[in-house]
């Protein structure tokens, strides 16, 4: 099942987010074959304010366990966390980079 993580930063977390971002990206890379999509959420000025991740997990508990070890989570960047199960019924055609 794909789980979507809607993760909003606490206020004034830009510097910490940038500092921890390499660890965050490395942690995500370990799940590369299970990621449907992932990227930062941006405000009206295109500044990072959170993360949106869609990752395949065997259960909600596994998704929650994975998130508990995620570097932004451990550093206290996120102020609001929502995890929802997701069923994809549409083939993506827009907004995705070409395959490398």
Image: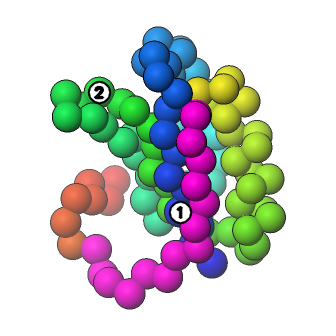
Tell which of 92 and 78 is nearer to you.
Answer: 78
* Most distant residue in the bottom direction: 89
What percent of the width, then of the height, locates residue 55?
A: 57, 63
Main SS, magenta region, reads strand
- Residue at 50 percent across and 52 percent down: it is 6
Residues packed near mark 1 inside 10 Å, few (<14), some (14 to 19) or many (20 plus)? many
Find the distance from the CA under tag 1 to the CA under tag 2: 21 Å
Tell which of 90 and 6 is nearer to you.
Answer: 6
Which residues lie in the magenta part? 78-92
In the image: residue 38, left or right of residue 68: left
Tell which of 65 and 6 is nearer to you.
Answer: 6
What percent of the width, then of the height, locates residue 2?
A: 57, 72
Asked if residue 62 can be seen in this view, the reply is yes
- Residue at 43 percent across and 81 percent down: it is 88
In the image: residue 43, left or right of residue 4: left
Along the polypeptide, which appears first: circle 1 or circle 2? 1
The residue identified by callout 1 is: 4
What percent of the width, then of the height, locates residue 31?
A: 62, 54
Q: State yes or no: discs 1 and 2 in contact (Cβ < 8 Å).
A: no
Any magenta on residue 41? no
Tell me, for residue 22, which label it has, or none.
none
The residue identified by callout 2 is: 47
In the rendered view, would you say 7 is above or below 26? below
């Amino acid at each position: 099942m794909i789980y979507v993580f809607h993760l909003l930063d606490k206020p004034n977390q830009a510097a910490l987010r940038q500092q921890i971002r390499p660890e965050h990206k490395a942690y995500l890379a370990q799940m590369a074959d299970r990621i449907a999509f992932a990227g930062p959420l941006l405000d009206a000025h295109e500044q990072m304010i959170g993360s949106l991740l869609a990752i395949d997990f065997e259960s909600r508990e596994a998704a929650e366990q994975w998130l508990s070890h995620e570097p932004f989570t451990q550093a206290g960047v996120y102020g609001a966390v929502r995890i929802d199960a997701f069923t994809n019924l549409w083939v993506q055609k827009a907004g995705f980079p070409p395959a490398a």
